[in-house]
Image (cartoon, helix red, strand yellow):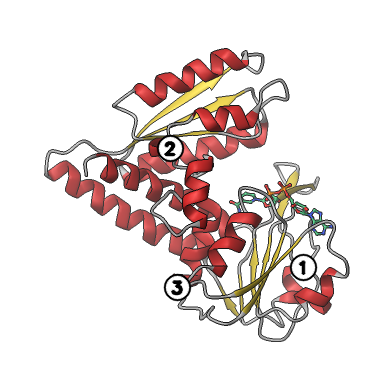
Amino acid sequence: MNILDGKKISNDIKDEITEAVAQMKTNGEKTPHLAAVIVGEDGASLTYVGSKVRACARVGFESTLVQLPADITEADLLAKIQELNADDEIDGFIVQLPLPSHIDTQKVLLAVDPKKDVDGFHPENFGKLALDMETFIPATPYGIMELLRRYDINTSGKHTVVIGRSHIVGRPISILMSRKGQPGDSTVTLTHSRTKDLASFTKNADIVISALGVPNFLTADMVKEGAVIIDVGITRVPDNTTTKGYVITGDVDFEAVREKASYITPVPGGVGPMTIAMLLQNTLLARQRSVQ
Ligand code: NAD
């Protein structure tokens, strides 16, 4: 069994980005600037945004945190987005999800200029992803593809089973794994909450990508010997023995499944750090594309 070390690979990617930024500075060019919009005070969202802003500092990007009150009106949030769209200083920005229920998320994501949509959530960018066109690939699926690529895992002709069909992970990764190229060229089965006898699919899978958010859902009896296991799940499970009062748990019963897997991502330290690295990569791309 080999660990797919997302922490190490994400650090390699951050080093590469740091070098590219240093080169931009040497050339007297503008350096990438990421803005993150957060609405409200949700603890997990604040943690995620905080780590994205810290990651910007680590690679030499400028960053701006736009903190807005939970009761902001949809119109005011849309006005803020138009401001960011028009601001030449900002190369890319994200709107941290989920948004409060009185705000229409689709409307907000549609308002983001596709050229600055470094999360890749705008329908224009998602459509381009499905059509093999240049775009911003959403950071989590992009991170999974990069892990497979850098560990040189052959995915061609393999059966990949994805669990979960969300717009940000399951759906895009199922498209990416079926696209031409390496990684890709997989035969993909997309499973979800309505799938009957889900284990009958995972037992036959060469690669399982689990993105449902149910701790220890994927057990050893559900995977075949030698399978590649990618665990996207991040769930805070209450645990009074820790100082934080919770532990981060993936979708995979790691200790048992690792005995059968050829490669497996740990949680934490697998897909999570890759997501942040690929957000930085997309911001670098946004900067580079704006001067082309
Ligand atoms: P989501 O809640 O939007 O979607 C979950 C999906 O799982 C749905 O499509 C649903 O059909 C499916 N599902 C739910 N219960 C199921 C069951 N019993 N059997 C089969 N399918 C089932 O989830 P999401 O936003 O894609 O996130 C999934 C998990 O990944 C969460 O734990 C989330 O925290 C985590 N996540 C991690 C990262 C990262 O950077 N590592 C990024 C995004 C999401």
Between marks 3 and 1 in the image, the one whose residue lies nearer the viewer: 3
Camera-side residue: 98 or 85? 85
Q: Earlier in the sequence, mark 3 or mark 2?
A: 2
Res 138 seen here: no
Res 253 label = 1
Query: Image check: 111 left or right of 99?
Result: left
Camera-side residue: 198 or 18? 198
Quadrant of the image containing the N terminus: bottom right
Query: Image check: 26 left or right of 102?
Result: left
Tell me whether circle 3 and circle 2 mark residues in contact (CB < 8 Å).
no
Camera-side residue: 137 or 24? 137
Residue 130 appears at what percent x and percent y? 52, 56
The amino acid pointed to by label 1 is Asp
**Residue labelled with disc 3:** 181
Query: Which residue is pictured at 53% across the width and 19% down the height?
Result: 78
**Residue labelled with disc 2:** 114
Q: Farthest bottom residue? A: 225
Residue 255 appears at what percent x and percent y? 74, 72
Camera-side residue: 199 or 38? 199
Residue 101 appears at what percent x and percent y? 73, 25
Between marks 1 and 2 in the image, the one whose residue lies nearer the viewer: 2
Please tell me whether residue 191 is drawn above or below residue 272 in the rendered image. below
Please tell me whether residue 213 is drawn above or below residue 206 in the rendered image. above
Query: Image check: 21 left or right of 175?
Result: left
The amino acid pointed to by label 3 is Gly
Give the spatial CA distance, label 1 vs label 2.
Answer: 38 Å
Ligand 1 within 8 A of label 2's CB?
no
Q: Give SS at disc 1.
A: loop
Q: Earlier in the sequence, mark 3 or mark 1?
A: 3
